[in-house]
Image (cartoon, rainbow, N blue to C red):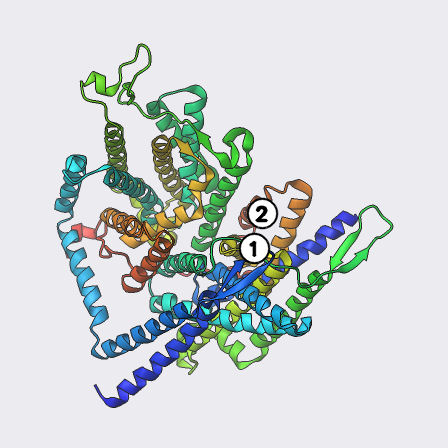
Amino acid sequence: MEKKDIIQSFKDSLFTGLIALALFGPIVGLRTASKGEGLFITPQWGIVFLLVGLCILGRFLINLNSARKTEITFFSKFTSKFSAITEDKAKHFAITAILFAAVFPFLPFTDRYFMDVAIMILTYIMLGWGLNIVVGLAGLLDLGYVAFYAVGAYSYALIATTFGWSFWICLPLAGVFAAFFGILLGFPVLRLRGDYLAIVTLGFGEIIRIILINWYEVTNGPDGITGIPRPSFFGLPFKRSPDEGETSFHLFFNLEYSTMHRIIFLYYLILVLALITNYFTLKIRKLPVGRAWEALREDEIACKSLGVNPTNTKLTAFAIGAMFGGFAGSFFATRQAFISPESFTFIESAIIVAIVVLGGMGSQTGVVLASIFLIGITEMFRDLEQYRMIAFGGAMVLIMVFKPKGILANRKPTILMHGGKK
Amino acid sequence: MEYFIQQLVNGITLGSIYGLIAIGYTMVYGIIGMINFAHGDIFMIGAFIALISFIIFGLTGVALPIILLLVLLIAMLFTACYGWTVEKLAYKPLRGSFRLAPLISALGMSIVLQNYVQVAQGARVKPMQPMISGGLEFFKNSEFIVTVSYLQIFIVILTIILMGIFTYLITKTDLGRAQRACEQDRTMTALLGINVDRTISITFIIGSSLASVAGMMFVLYYGVIDFYIGFLAGIKAFTAAVLGGIGSLPGAMLGGLLIGLIETFWAGYVSLEYKDVAAFSVLIVVLIFFPTGFLGKPDIEKV
């Protein structure tokens, strides 16, 4: 490298430092804190200089590096290799993953914490697959998916606590309710173009949340609903001491009582629900309606001229996506045994959309990888409570910058003319 | 009647704040066709910078008008740095990529900014003593006295001045011409020797500065801020931009006013709890009848 280049990149780094000073100076450097009456400023210049120094150094290293053009190519080479492997051997990957998921609870290192994280990841995988129908297949950007999740959770909770019906009756009902809300919202708004649709669905998500907070008589407001019945194993509850005339799970199978039984059961429950979602999506993609979704995503005008009714087709995608959201919601309610509007904020929608898009839109395997990656990141930063969301958001930006089409970008078309042969 | 006028005044004040934020959304949408989701958080950062500078200048004992002017300039300058950096880091590398990529990147940026402020400034709400107090009272003989505070007058006049400068900038200067040209056809503009990257950067700088002014008004008007204000204000301002017709600058201001009025009247006459629902419901209804908003250009799809 020439001397001129080094001087140039040094100047550039100093400029970066100046900008960094402007960015961090007021917000980080001058921390406001209340003391008695009013606010006072506590300066924290040490951290600011540290951050600015890091920015200058980082920029300088990137400049030196980009002269050799290695960093980005390395990254994309790595990820494209990765996606090539999974695309080629998608089937093997899927089978291995399902087998691993099936034996996961009985692996020696699996403890309560791992199970909880696994259940959470599976819930997001299911939500991701559900939303993938809407975003990935039909190409409709839905930023209010959490609304259907909430509708599912609340209908399950309300039906179960009011009528005392079992999980297996409430689950389909919750799905039906969520699908109904999907149609209710979809009917007026699906004629809108992409970005308008995004903002309207976002608004809808907020409306549902505000109603949940304020409709005190039904939803119990911000306090939420407690005492939601736990699911039973085909009529056998997971209780240490069952009620009169009842046999609990551990007595029936002659096992020693353990709270893990219920966790393992919940794990398999969500695994099966998620796999059903996946199976359904894979099948429906081969049916006329699934083909119509993908065709609509690619070219709406062409579809119209071929006699596909865009509104009805989109509506089915919306309703089916909402239904799976509702199923996931009722699972969430029964797992937590407590729900409140706080669980259904916009950030949840953002996470689910991020999972779908980061995974590579329409790619089922991508959703799995993205869920593991994103939820894994937030779990890894768990001890640094406040920094985990920064890491999460940062990861979203970084993946988009380096892999704008998602982790598994090279998704093959579902159908090719003449079977793909020339 | 008096109550109605009072709500009207409050609504216009709130609408001015939304309108200023909405301009940022609509400009960015016009020029690069993306929803800049982080814009609401840029507004929040503007509010924080304004708050911090109010505290610092409050200690010096300078006259109020000078403080206001200084805070205004400082907030605009520093917030513009944020807007510029966000564009450079999160959106510029994605130009020309598929449509959802910048949106996801913007969502990520919004999460980063929100949590960054939470870490740096703490999660508690930040109260501030009122800087501008007093006001004019009307209908003193009737049951309900209408109060127009000096603060409200200040906010509305400042908005009008800024809108004037801004309109001049967009319609009369080279910069504005370049900006409008980029909106129409970016490739052609580049061929004609206009630096498109620079124009886009300037768009972000202008949008962020206007948002920071809205942030300053928010601090003065409500007297409390926290790291989360950007979300709701952001989506309402975006709603305003869509309502007025996204991409249209007068539309953004009109939409902002409408959203402000709808919200205030709803809170005043119907129910306070559901005031946020009102804005979104109106949006859904309007979009059914005016799919491109009130002042938006109908876009013709070509095959």
What's the residue at 38%, 32% (across, down)? A333
First of labels 1, 2 by sequence position: 1
User: Which residue has dot 1 on it?
Assistant: B243
The residue carrying mark 2 is B282
Eyeballing the image, is B76 above or below B266? below
Residue A15 can be seen, yes or no? yes
Are marks 1 and 2 in one subunit?
A: yes
Name the residue nearer the viewer: A251 or B16. A251
In the picture provided, is A260 more to the left or to the right than B120?
left
Three-letter amino acid code at the position of disc 1? Leu
- Residue A2 at x, y percent in the picture: 22, 88
Residue B23's tag is: none
Say few, some or many: other residues with alpha carbon within 10 Å of mark 2 (under 14 / 14 to 19 / 20 or more): some
Disc 2 is placed on an element classified as helix
Dot 1 and dot 2 residues touching (CB under 8 Å): yes
Cα distance in 3D space between marks 1 and 2: 9 Å
Name the side, left or right, on which B113 lies relative to B271.
left
Residue farthest top in this picture: A245
Q: In which quarter of the image is residue A113?
A: top left
